Image (spheres, rainbow, N blue to C red):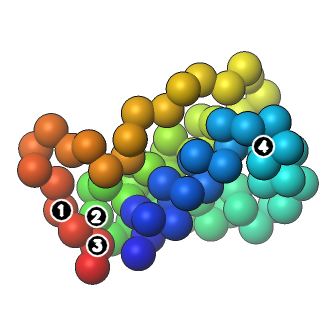
């Protein structure tokens, strides 16, 4: 579930209105930081880092799919 939620946040952050909304809520960054550091799977941690990158004060970059894991991935389910 962590990876699904983090992937959704990363996708929302690709759009200006979504990015603004996510940046206004400090709990988003706090939660993503926790998952990036302690997430249940490698994919969840990667998705959280990707979402955090999108929330930084930089132009939005097109995100690769968080679910695409070259190593076969682990599931947080």
Q: CA distance from mark 1 to mark 4?
A: 28 Å
Residue 26 quadrant: bottom right
Q: Earlier in the sequence, mark 4 or mark 2?
A: 4
Per the image, the residue denoted by label 3 is 76
* Percent x, y of residue 21: 85, 53
Q: CA distance from mark 4 to mark 2?
A: 25 Å
Q: Is residue 48 left or right of residue 46?
A: right
Please, what secondary structure does the residue beneath circle 1 have? loop
Q: Please report the residue visible at 54 percent of the width from the left and 26 percent of the height from the top.
A: 62
Locate the N terminus by quadrant: bottom left
Per the image, the residue denoted by label 1 is 74
Q: Earlier in the sequence, mark 1 or mark 4?
A: 4
Mark 2 and mark 1 residues within 8 Å of each other at the beta carbon: yes
Q: Please report the residue visible at 50 percent of the width from the left and 41 percent of the height from the top.
A: 50
Please, what secondary structure does the residue beneath circle 2 have? loop
Please, what secondary structure does the residue beneath circle 3 have? loop
Q: Please report the residue visible at 44 percent of the width from the left and 65 percent of the height from the top.
A: 4
Q: CA distance from mark 1 to mark 3?
A: 7 Å
Mark 4 and mark 2 residues within 8 Å of each other at the beta carbon: no
Q: Earlier in the sequence, mark 2 or mark 3?
A: 2
Per the image, the residue denoted by label 2 is 41
């Amino acid at each position: 579930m962590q990876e699904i939620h983090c992937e959704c946040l990363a996708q929302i952050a690709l759009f200006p209105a979504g990015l603004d909304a996510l940046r206004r809520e400090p709990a988003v960054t706090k939660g993503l930081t926790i998952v990036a550091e302690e997430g249940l799977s490698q994919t969840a941690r990667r998705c959280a880092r990707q979402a955090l990158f999108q929330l930084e004060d930089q132009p939005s970059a097109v995100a690769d799919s968080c679910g695409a894991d070259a190593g076969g991935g682990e599931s947080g389910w």
